[in-house]
Image (cartoon, rainbow, N blue to C red):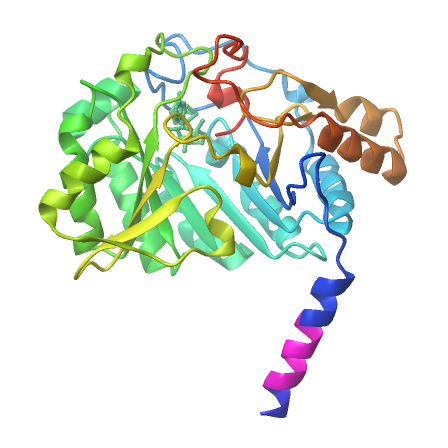
């Protein structure tokens, strides 16, 4: 077993050589959420208006070369996990090559993607081959007619086929993200929980957050995770799952006898900002320090003005210094952010 021992030694050596990034509140920042487009092929009512939104011009988007350059510098400084998101990341041409390019950057240990699943059946195999490990598919209802109402597009069949394709191509785990909204889809909580019994899916219930651009958010529409858990317990014992490094703020559980898991992301009922490990990069190259803060640092200007790696590094450190201690939802000082989720990358 000398091989196993020496590879363990090298892993320890590499980890100890890697830089650790931390912010002013001693949080280790190792995760980048990268939004590659503000375009989307759905119009979820809580995220985008029916007519769509004013879109960035193609020349405004970071090119893939620019993205790879940024990630190389970030990875040298301690970012090890990257999640592609949008808008809908699978609508941007060449996304598989981008995944391939990111996956081989030294220091990047994990590449994942969040998608609405509409194009996933087409892309799952190529994404897995390109080095994507895990995938999150957003799905707020299991009823095709309701899906058409929520998203304003009749694409349920395509999304479900995408989930099946992701499972069959070995993406692991396949997470199904459900935003639970009162009077919208809260009657399907148990149906979603049952998915984790029948399939090796990780179903994650997400509290509805106040973001720009969708239909007006109201506090009374939020279903707190504790209430969701109560309901799921009617199906059986909800046992604690193990907590892994990639979990971020999700609390993990499983139903006895289930093939999959059930998770809860509770930005409203339990502030998890002390565990925040991420930065975001918008499609036009602005580092965003917090989902709820409109404070952004422009990287595109630097790149196009022949910025050096040192300048990109300096922008990264500026972002860390600007990262707020927490969001202020529920506080009188809270201001809803200007951008919609589609323009930031959820
Ligand atoms: N289009 C892709 C998708 O839907 O998965 C990626 C981008 S989308 C903005 C990322 C996630 O943000 C989705 O799971 C979506 O449901 C979630 N989201 C959007 N608006 C939200 C809100 N106000 N509260 C909670 N989650 C939201
Ligand atoms: Fe598009 Fe995702 Fe927003 Fe739905 S949640 S409109 S799929 S970006």
Which residue appears at 70% of the width and 54% of the height?
105
Q: Is residue 257 magenta?
A: no
Is 211 positioned to the left or the right of 1 in the image? Answer: left
Is 87 on the left-hand or right-hand side of 121? right
Q: Is 268 rendered above or below residue 261? A: above
Ligand 1 positioned in quadrant: top left
Q: Position of residue 177 (x, y in %)?
A: 34, 38
Residue, far bottom: 1
Query: How far from the left and from the top, in percent, is residue 22?
Result: 71, 42
Q: Position of residue 245 (x, y in %)?
A: 51, 54
| Residue occupying the point 84% across, 33% down | 314
Looking at this view, is 244 or 184 the one in front? 244
Q: Would you place residue 295 above or below residue 97 in this image?
A: above
**Residue 239 as seen in the image, left or right of residue 73:** left
Q: Quadrant of the N terminus?
A: bottom right
Residue farthest left in this picture: 234
Relative to 94, residue 75 above or below: below
Residue 271 visible within the image: yes
What count of labels does the image hold?
A: 0
Which residue is found at the position 25% from the left and 42% from the top?
160
Q: Is residue 126 visible?
A: no
| Vertical side of 346 occupied by 117: above or below | below
* Residue at figure coordinates x 72%, y 33% from the top left: 320
What span is colored magenta in the figure?
4-11
The answer to which quarter of the image holds residue 316 is top right
Q: Residue 130 in the image: state x and y as whole percent.
A: 54, 55
Q: Magenta region, mostly helix, strand or loop? A: helix
């Amino acid at each position: 077993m000398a091989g196993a021992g020496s590879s363990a030694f090298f892993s320890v050596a590499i980890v100890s050589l890697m830089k650790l990034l931390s912010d002013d509140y001693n949080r280790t920042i190792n995760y980048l959420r990268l939004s590659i487009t503000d375009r989307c092929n759905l119009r979820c009512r809580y995220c985008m208006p029916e007519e769509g939104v004013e879109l960035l011009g193609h020349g405004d988007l970071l090119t893939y070369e620019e993205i790879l350059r940024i990630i190389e510098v970030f990875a040298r400084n301690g970012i090890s996990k990257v999640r592609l998101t949008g808008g809908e990341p699978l609508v941007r041409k060449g996304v598989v090559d981008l995944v391939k390019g990111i996956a081989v950057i030294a220091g990047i240990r994990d590449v994942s993607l969040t998608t609405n699943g509409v194009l996933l059946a087409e892309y799952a195999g190529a994404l897995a081959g390109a080095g994507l490990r895990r995938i999150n598919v957003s799905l707020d209802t299991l009823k095709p007619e309701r899906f058409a109402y929520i998203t304003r597009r009749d694409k349920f069949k395509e999304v479900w086929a995408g989930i099946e394709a992701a499972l069959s191509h070995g993406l692991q785990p396949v997470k199904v993200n459900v935003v639970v909204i009162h009077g919208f889809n809260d009657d399907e909580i148990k149906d979603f929980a049952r998915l984790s019994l029948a399939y090796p899916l990780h179903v994650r219930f997400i509290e509805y957050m106040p973001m720009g651009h969708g239909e007006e958010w109201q506090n009374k529409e939020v279903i707190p995770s504790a209430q969701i858990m109560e309901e799921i317990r009617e199906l059986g014992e909800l046992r604690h799952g193990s907590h892994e490094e990639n979990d971020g703020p999700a609390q993990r559980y499983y139903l006895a006898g289930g093939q999959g898991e059930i998770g809860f992301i509770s930005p409203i009922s339990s502030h998890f900002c002390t565990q925040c490990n991420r930065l975001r990069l918008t499609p036009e190259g602005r580092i965003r320090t917090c989902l709820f803060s409109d404070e952004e640092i422009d990287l595109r200007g630097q790149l196009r003005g022949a910025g050096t790696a040192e300048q990109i590094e300096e922008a990264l450190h500026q972002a860390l210094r600007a990262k707020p201690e927490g969001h202020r939802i529920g506080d009188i000082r809270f201001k809803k952010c200007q951008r919609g989720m589609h323009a930031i990358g959820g």
